[in-house]
Image (cartoon, rainbow, N blue to C red):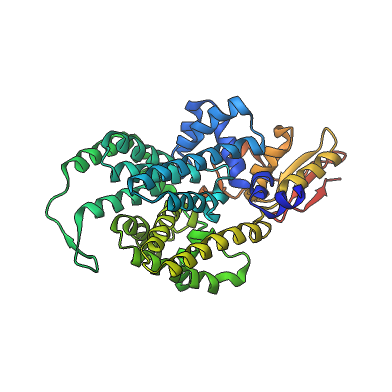
Amino acid sequence: MMNFLINHTPLLYLTQSLWRDEAFSVLMSEPPLPEIIKLTVGDFNPPLYYFILHSWMRIFGNGEIAIRMLSFIFHLALVYVCYKFAKALKFSRLFTFYFLLFTFLNPMLIYYAFEARMYSLLALLATTSMYFFYTKNWVPYVLTSALGLWAQPFMVFVLLAQGAYLLAKTEGQRGYLILTKKLKKEYLISFLFIFLLFSLWLPVILFQLTRSGPMWIWPINWTTVTTILGDLFTGYEGTPWDLWNKMKILSLIILGLALFSRRLLFFLWLFLPVVLVLLISYFKPIYVNRYLIFATVAEVFLIILGISSIKNQLVRNLFAIFFLLFTIFFNFWFPPLHKKLDLRMTVAEIKNLAKPADLVFSQTPLTFFEATYYFPDRSRVFLYNPKGVEVPYYAGHNLITKEKWVNAFPKYPRRAFLIHDDATFEVFSQK
């Protein structure tokens, strides 16, 4: 039973090997706070998550489960904010319970609830910002919105959705948009304070834009456009490959419920960021589904609101049962297919074979952070870089300094365990 729970449910996400971005989070968060700020200048994400993880690790350590539980706490807090939102929207008790269960179990949200990155924090802050925006509670709105920007720059798309909502007014049965002439004074003042609170980091973002260089993000195509809603709901990124057509069908169902809900705020919360990111990605690829994790929360709202708007009770219940059963099934079926590369096992084997003078080399930057995290003596871990190629900006160059580069294998009897990108390794030395 325990083996099934760990290997065939989202608990797998909690217990599996760290992947490079998670190991990067740990290494970024270990130094003193001033050093974290300095390192973050070379990262795409502002330092808020690293600050929080730094404090968390001082109390609970840097073990895999310990660091991932921080994201799970953010996820639980997100569910609580959704409960407050449901009360503000006057959901019935039954629909509130269904909504909270649906949010907690959402495949995309639960995946990042067990990943040591800032995405669960981003979902929490974006949703909290939207809740305070909806309830017109401007001081906490300013604080949570500013913190969202300090967590991940894509939070700006949430603010744009809120601004678009204030510019728009629904009239008529089909909800056509008519621009108003006046922005609400409270929002303008709030937005000014949000800008001021984030302004210290704006020069860093501008600097990063000029230094970013080549990116790892794939260009979008028509499949991206037609499957994006399903991808955001499930966290699907192409593995297994044969799900794309199913994601198209799921996207159409979600789109239909979103339109049927006739809730402009949540519609803009989902579609304005998605459309803007796709438009930008047509010229410069920036679309990664986890960067839009806040849109997943909007999807959950729209699905619930769409279902609750169905007048026929039988049809309404069938939709509710379908989505809940689909979510539960997906959470049992998908985790074994969404496993991270098991560098933990690789490094454990190397630890058993390595002698005190032996070294560990990563063939590329893609495995360097996991090797550094898992190998007990970090001073013996290096990047094998015989041609002296600069580490790409997106590959964590700020943590792979030239002192960690090597261009040759050690002389026998010392050996180097060279880790490949597929988690295999070879042993080398020079005569």
Residue at image position (62%, 47%) is 20
Q: Nearer the viewer, residue 257 or 62?
A: 257
When the figure is inspected, residue 60 is found, relative to residue 280, above or below; the finding is above
When the figure is inspected, residue 330 is found, relative to residue 52, above or below; the finding is below
Residue at image position (48%, 41%) is 42
Question: How many marks do you count on the picture?
Answer: 0
Q: Quadrant of residue 114?
A: top right
Q: Can residue 199 be seen in this view?
A: no
Residue at image position (33%, 37%) is 198
Q: Nearer the viewer, residue 117 or 93?
A: 93
Quarter that holds the C terminus: top right
Residue 257 relative to residue 62: left or right: left
Residue at image position (74%, 53%) is 4
Residue 199 placement (x, y as % from top left)? 31, 37
Q: Which of 306 and 399 is in front in this view?
A: 306
Residue 376 relative to residue 13: left or right: right
When the figure is inspected, residue 331 is found, relative to residue 344, above or below; the finding is below
Q: In which quarter of the image is residue 132?
A: top left
Residue 33 placement (x, y as % from top left)? 49, 27
Residue 227 placement (x, y as % from top left)? 48, 68
Q: Nearer the viewer, residue 184 or 63?
A: 184
Q: Is residue 312 visible?
A: yes
Residue 140 placement (x, y as % from top left)? 32, 34
List the single residue furthest toward the front: 313
